[in-house]
Amino acid sequence: MAISCEDKYKTPVPEDRTCPVCGKDIEVFVVKGRVVEDAECECGHVIKAEEPEV
């Protein structure tokens, strides 16, 4: 099954972000630059999912 051009922008992509508390890398999943699900660092800090564009 082929993936359309628009589908590639809907698929979450892993991205590393730096934890603002301890400085370690946290893997988050993003679509169009927005975090789509909460990601927790080892230190307990949580990067919250962002609201989708309307």
Image (tube, grey):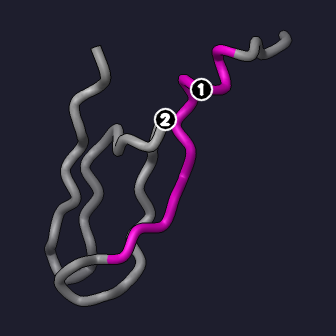
Say whether residue 10 is magenta: yes
Q: Badge 2: few (under 14), some or many (20 or more) residues near its Cα, within 10 Å? A: some
> Taking 6 as reference, is 50 left or right?
left
Q: Is residue 43 depicted above or below 1 in this figure?
A: below
Determine the residue positioned at 76% across, 12% down.
4
Q: Are marks 1 and 2 in contact (CB under 8 Å)?
A: yes
In the displayed structure, 2 sits above or below 45; it is above
Q: Secondary structure at mark 1?
A: helix
Write the residue at 84% across / 10% down.
1
Q: Quadrant of the C terminus?
A: top left
Q: Which mark is residue 9?
A: 1
- Which x, y percent locates residue 3? 78, 16
Please tell me which residue lies in front, 42 or 51: 51
Report which quarter residue 49 is drawn in.
top left
Residue 48 is situated, as x and y percent measured from the top left of the image, at 19, 50
The residue that appears at 22% across and 78% down in the rendered structure is 20
Determine which of the numbered discs, if any, sits on residue 32 in the image.
2
Q: Is 52 contained in the magenta span?
A: no
Q: CA distance from mark 1 to mark 2?
A: 7 Å
Q: Residue furthest bottom?
A: 22
Does label 1 or label 2 sit earlier along the sequence?
Answer: 1
Per the rendered image, the range of residues in magenta is: 6-18
Q: Residue at x 27, y 73 (%)?
A: 41
What is the three-letter code of the residue carrying label 2? Lys
Left or right: where does residue 38 sit relative to residue 1? left
Percent x, y of residue 11 = 57, 29
Name the amino acid, label 1.
Answer: Tyr
